[in-house]
Amino acid sequence: MDGSRRRVINATAPVRICDLGGWTDTWFAGHGAVFNLGVYPYAEVQLYVSRAAGASAPRVVIHAENFGDRYEVRSAPPEYDKHPLLEACLDIMDLPPDLSFEVNLYSNAPAGCSTGTSAAVSVALLGALDLLTPGRMTPHEVAAMAHRVETEKLGLQCGIQDQLCSAYGGACFIEMHAYPHASVSQVQVSNSAWWELERRLALVFLGRSHASSEVHGRVIAGFERENADTSALAPLRQAAHDAKNALYEGDFAAFGKAMLLNTEAQRALHPALVSAEAEAVFALAREHGAIGWKVNGAGGEGGSVTLLFGPESEKKRAFRKALPALNPDFAYIPIYLSRFGLRQWESA
């Protein structure tokens, strides 16, 4: 690399919504099926690589733009003290020892939106860092490494769907045969079906960050017991299959029913997984012609919900106009379906 030239490496990855079959992509589920949708706003990473080989000691700076944090990572391996996810991504990669760079990370999705934003950030960051290493990882390999960051490096409970959706994008159908191994198929449909799905969808942030809760712990503890009954997961798997089939057929009424099946199955795991705030948004959406709704992610307080409206765009617009009166902290987040997952390139 020419020492006078700064390389700029870019990577983006979509977040996910409408994760039908969530909870079945976990180690305690045994096997699973998930249908989800990759959408923009995406996570964005830029690497500014400015030092040539043979210069002074390597220097890595992290700029977490959403948080206003900019700091140098001094130790090798780095300490997980300020932004553990980012620091663990740097730690897991076998980076050349003679490079210095700044990492800039940004996402338009609200923190704690329960749309897999942390997975999108880690997929984008690992994808960008991959351009600094010999060889290249496939999107599936990047997703697997991002999953390892959360489970192995950070010791977190983590399903596999978020990382895979960010890596592949589009309408993803994920079949997990034995945790964490899975196959991923993108559901390919006509432009008209794609545009119609995008037009009908809505994402609503419930005004506060989602975080794993005591409720999640109780649900997981129930499945961890020896000879635990996991039959409650069967309707979730079915919802994923139903959504995939409905989209192939362009049957949005059936797609909405798959969302409702998933919502009831999620509620059956624990009533608190579908919060009072989510129920209020569902009721308002139903008044404005919505035919499907689902809490994003594992459920519980905060986070966000996905809505599917009927054919009349005016009713969806009327819902958006009425939302602030329901709760001024709720936010309607514009989304666009992402045909692509992880994208990596170097600026000219």
Image (cartoon, rainbow, N blue to C red):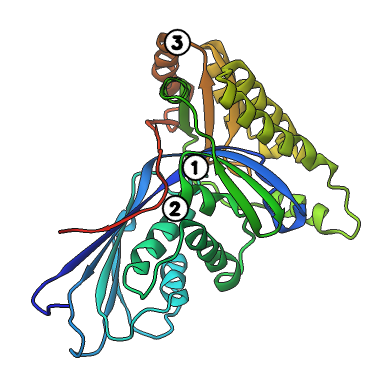
Residue at mark 3 = 315
C-alpha span from label 3 to label 2: 31 Å
The first of marks 1 and 2 along the sequence is 1
Classify mark 1: helix, strand or loop: strand
Residue at mark 2 = 120
Image quarter of residue 293: top right
C-alpha span from label 1 to label 2: 8 Å
Q: Quadrant of the C terminus?
A: bottom left
Circles 1 and 3, Cβ within 8 Å, touching? The answer is no
Q: Nearer the viewer, residue 345 or 225?
A: 345
Q: Do we see residue 280 in this rendering? A: no
Q: Nearer the viewer, residue 326 or 339?
A: 339
The first of marks 3 and 2 along the sequence is 2
Q: Residue at x 32, y 67 (%)?
A: 131
Look at label 1 and name its amino acid: Arg
Look at label 3 and name its amino acid: Lys
Residue 271 higher or lower than 312, as above or below: below
Q: Dot 1, how many residues are within 10 Å of its Cα: few (below 14), some (14-19), or many (20+)?
A: many
Residue at mark 1 = 16
Q: Quadrant of the N terminus?
A: bottom left
Look at label 2 and name its amino acid: Ala
Q: Position of residue 14 (x, y in %)?
A: 41, 45
Residue 66 higher or lower than 52, as above or below: above
Position of 302 with respect to 28 (left or right) is left
Image quarter of residue 332: top left
Q: Position of residue 327 (x, y in %)?
A: 47, 27
Residue 243 higher or lower than 22, as above or below: above
The first of marks 1 and 3 along the sequence is 1
Circles 1 and 2, Cβ within 8 Å, touching? The answer is yes
Q: Residue at x 69, y 54 (%)?
A: 26
The residue positioned farthest toward the left in the image shown: 4
